[in-house]
Amino acid sequence: METKQMRRKDKEVVDINEKINIIDKCKVCRLAMTDDDQPYIIPLNFGYVYENNILTLYFHSAYQGMKIDILKKNNKVCFEIDCNHALIEANEPSQCSFAFESVIGFGKIIFLEADEEKSYGLDQLMKHQTGKDIKYQYPENQLKSVNVYKMEVEIFTGKHRLFPNH
C-alpha cells in the first residue's frame, strides 16, 4: 500500500524503535472503517506485537454491533493512536503549539476463530494494557463469548512534536 508523503518532514518519526515506543505508550486506538460511503471511527483498547518487521494489533468486543457489521463487509481499516498531549504556550496566540506523539497505519482486520489464537490475542491486549507479560488461562465459555480480531498492519507512519526542551 502506498501512502502520500508526509508534508511536515520535521515532525516525522522515521526510526522504527521510536514508532514502537509511541505505540507502547498509548493505550487507546481509534479504528476507522467505511460502511459503503459512510465513515465510522471507534476508540478501542488494544494490544500489539511487532515481530519480523510486522505490526499486528489485537482487539476484542462483542460479536454483534455496528462495528462488526461494517468490518464483515469491508475489512480494510485505518488506525490512529496518540499520546503525550500538552499545550506549548507562547506570549502570542499564533505562536502557541501542541506537543504530541502519534502513529497512523493501514491494514486489514482478521477475525480469530481458534481458541489458541483468541487466547494469544487477549494475552497481547492484557500485556499492553497492564504491563504484565502473563499467559492467562481463559475458560472455554469465555473464549466462545468474546470476539477477538487482529489488524495486520500493511504500513504505518509516526509523527511527533516534542516540547522544546526535549
Image (cartoon, helix red, strand yellow):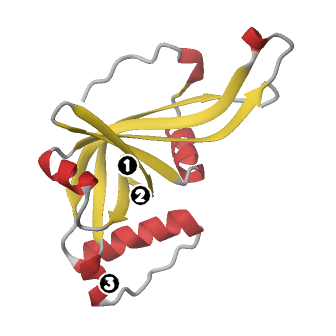
- The residue that mark 3 highlights is 142
Circle 3 packing at 10 Å, graded few (<14), some (14-19), many (20+), is few
- Occupied quadrant, residue 124: bottom left
For the residue labelled by badge 2, is the local secondary structure a helix, a strand or a loop? strand
Do tag 1 and tag 2 residues touch (Cβ < 8 Å)?
Answer: yes
- Occupied quadrant, residue 93: top right
The foreground one among 72 and 22 is 72
Side (left or right) of 159 relative to 150 = right
Side (left or right) of 14 relative to 90 = left
Residue drawn at the location 20% of the way across and 48% of the way down: 70
Number of marks: 3
- The residue that mark 1 highlights is 55
Q: Please determine whether, in this image, residue 125 is positioned above or below residue 100.
A: below
The foreground one among 148 and 38 is 38
Alpha-carbon span between mark 3 and mark 2: 23 Å
- The residue that mark 2 highlights is 49
The foreground one among 149 and 6 is 149
Work out whether mark 1 precedes mark 3 in sequence or the reverse, and give the earlier one: 1
Work out whether mark 1 precedes mark 2 in sequence or the reverse, and give the earlier one: 2
For the residue labelled by badge 1, is the local secondary structure a helix, a strand or a loop? strand
The foreground one among 63 and 150 is 63
Q: Please determine whether, in this image, residue 139 is positioned above or below residue 157.
A: below
Which amino acid does the dot numbered 1 rest on?
Answer: Leu
Instruction: Work out whether residue 145 can be spotted.
Output: yes
- Residue 118 in the image: state x and y as whole percent: 29, 73
Residue drawn at the location 27% of the way across and 72% of the way down: 117
Circle 1 packing at 10 Å, graded few (<14), some (14-19), many (20+), is some
For the residue labelled by badge 3, is the local secondary structure a helix, a strand or a loop? helix
